Image (cartoon, helix red, strand yellow):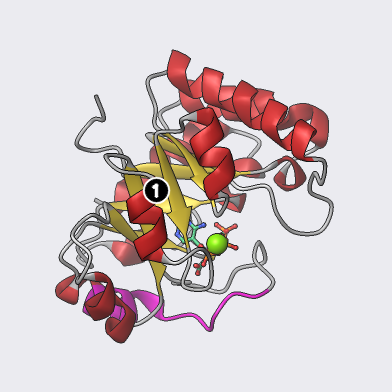
């Protein structure tokens, strides 16, 4: 049973976002310290390429999430999500078409990236979508093909038009998260803020202060 506040502090991480040997430890420390959702995103320079390794690594991450009762979401890869019977999948505008995802993965968490009010309006046509990931709110170094930032004002406009909960993504850090107050987001999703934090407990606690 997925908790109603599962989007509150949403951690995204692949093996390239941390030292390879630290991946599972990073995830477990984050789960222990209050992340409410996790996305397995294995992409970008230096990420795993072998489907067997990707599957095995994702499976270990999934088991950790199960221990902490936190939803395990797969980024992009519908086949992997199906194979693992993940709790959900997150896709972007240029990934597998949302209609196909909805059909192939019923009764699961489905996240869709949106970058503008127009994309939100078109996403609203699909009531099966669970949440929208909206951004980048600020500039990010974690995604080389990110769109230009929309900043908190752009985020607020998107939230106002969204028929589903919105998580803010892109460049969200401890020192700017307070700017999200009043935007109406249901949560924040981050890679580097948590992956690179020395004191993950403190950072996760501070990230919750957008509420
Ligand atoms: C929660 C969340 N929001 C947005 C994204 C970005 O998805 P996408 O645009 O498909 O880009 P990639 O992550 O696939 O590079 C996300 N992953 N998660
Ligand atoms: C995965 C991702 N998607 C984005 C989008 O705008 O859709 S920005 C992004 C990277 C988020 O990493 P960080 O928290 O380190 O900025
Ligand atoms: Mg994608």
150 lies left or right of 124 = right
Please tell me which residue lies in front, 55 or 157. 55
- Residue at left 74%, top 59%? 44
- Which segment did they paint magenta? 145-158
Instruction: Point out residue 200 in the picture as x, y percentages from the top left corner.
Output: 56, 33
In this rendering, the answer to whether 204 lies above or below 189 is above
Q: Quadrant of residue 125?
A: bottom left
Instruction: Provide the secondary structure element on which disc 1 rests.
Output: helix
Q: Locate the N terminus and report the quarter of the image it occupies.
A: top left
Q: Residues within 10 Å of mark 1 (few under 14, many from 20)?
A: few
The quarter of the image that holds ligand 2 is bottom right
Q: Quadrant of residue 111?
A: bottom left
Q: Is residue 42 one of those drawn in magenta?
A: no
Task: Kindly identify which residue carries mark 1.
Answer: 104
Question: Can the viewer see residue 133?
Answer: no
- Residue 26: horizontal and vertical position, in percent? 64, 30
Residue 6: percent from left, percent from top = 30, 37
Q: Residue furthest top?
A: 67
Q: Residue at x 50, y 56 (%)?
A: 173
- Residue at the spot x=71%, y=47% of the render? 17
Residue at (58%, 40%) from the top-left corner?
Answer: 80
Residue 17 in view here: yes
**Does 68 sit left or right of 12 as displayed?**
left
């Amino acid at each position: 049973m997925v908790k109603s506040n599962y989007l509150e502090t949403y951690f995204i991480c692949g093996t390239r976002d941390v030292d390879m040997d630290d991946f599972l430890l990073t995830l477990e420390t984050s789960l222990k310290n209050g992340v409410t959702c996790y996305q397995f995103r294995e992409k970008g320079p230096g990420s795993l390429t072998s489907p067997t390794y990707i599957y095995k690594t994702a499976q270990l991450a999934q088991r950790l999430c199960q221990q902490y009762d936190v939803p395990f979401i797969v980024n992009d890869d519908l086949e992997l999500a199906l194979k693992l019977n993940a709790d959900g999948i997150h896709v972007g505008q240029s990934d597998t078409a949302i209609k196909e995802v909805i059909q192939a993965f019923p009764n699961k968490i489905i996240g869709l990236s949106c970058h503008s009010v127009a994309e939100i309006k078109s996403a609203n046509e699909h009531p099966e979508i669970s949440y929208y990931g909206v951004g980048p709110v600020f500039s990010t170094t974690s995604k080389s093909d990110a769109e230009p930032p929309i900043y908190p004002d752009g985020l607020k406009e998107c939230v106002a038009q969204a028929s589903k909960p919105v998580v803010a993504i892109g460049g969200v850090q401890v020192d700017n998260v307070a700017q999200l107050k009043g935007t109406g987001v249901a949560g924040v999703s981050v890679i580097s803020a948590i992956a690179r934090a020395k004191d993950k407990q403190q950072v996760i606690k501070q990230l919750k202060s957008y509420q």
